Amino acid sequence: MAMYNNRRGFLRWLALGFGSLVGLLPALAQRRFNRAIAQGAASGPKAAEPEFVKVATLEDLKEGPFKVEDAFGKNTATLWLVGDPQKEDSLLALDAACPHAGCDVDWRGENFVCPCHGSVFAADGSRTRGPANADLTAYKVKVEKGEIFVART
């Protein structure tokens, strides 16, 4: 017995076949696109080295955490430079803006505290108490000949 005996059966199978093809083509194209993206990410060009900006000297850190106003020029960022509590002889550069509402945090004792809503951050910038739901943003730091440079990102 044939798959279709009349015109109606033929059209039904034709529509089913066409519909399957229409549904299958985008899935195949997406799979090919995803594979190309994955291969490009694995073998793509490396990101350019960040530009480092001089923000302070080691002499500035003798008294503890040091606040750098206008770190990248044109009122772009206020940073805190602190010794990394996890690594001796290492520095952290932390964005002073609280991730909750953008107020600049202050150094109080052993923590950073947001004066606007009371969020508290440890010396390494990790959040210890909200309402902020994220850590302070950290920047790459390098020290050369007693001068401290921070990556502009």
Image (tube, grey):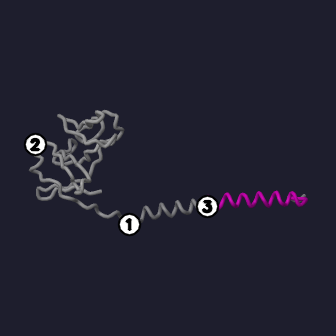
Q: Evaluate whether residue 128 shows in this view.
A: no
Does the magenta run of residues contain 7? yes
Identify whether 72 is placed above or below 136: below
Q: Residue at x 22, y 57 (%)?
A: 73
Q: Nearer the viewer, mark 2 or mark 3?
A: 2
Percent x, y for residue 85? 20, 41
- Tell me whether the residue at label 2 lies in contact with that at label 1, contact meaning CB atoms closer than 8 angstroms: no
Q: CA distance from mark 2 to mark 3?
A: 62 Å
Q: Which of the image's four quarters has the C terminus?
A: bottom left
- Tell me whether the residue at label 3 lies in contact with that at label 1, contact meaning CB atoms closer than 8 angstroms: no
Q: Which tag, 2 or 1, sits closer to the chain's start? A: 1
* Secondary structure of residue under mark 3: helix
Percent x, y for residue 82? 18, 45
Identify whether 56 is placed above or below 107: below
Percent x, y for residue 102? 31, 43
Q: Evaluate whether residue 6 shows in this view.
A: yes
Does the magenta run of residues contain 87? no
Q: Residue at x 22, y 36 (%)?
A: 111
The residue type indicated by label 2 comes to: Glu
Residue 13 lies left or right of residue 37; in this view the side is right
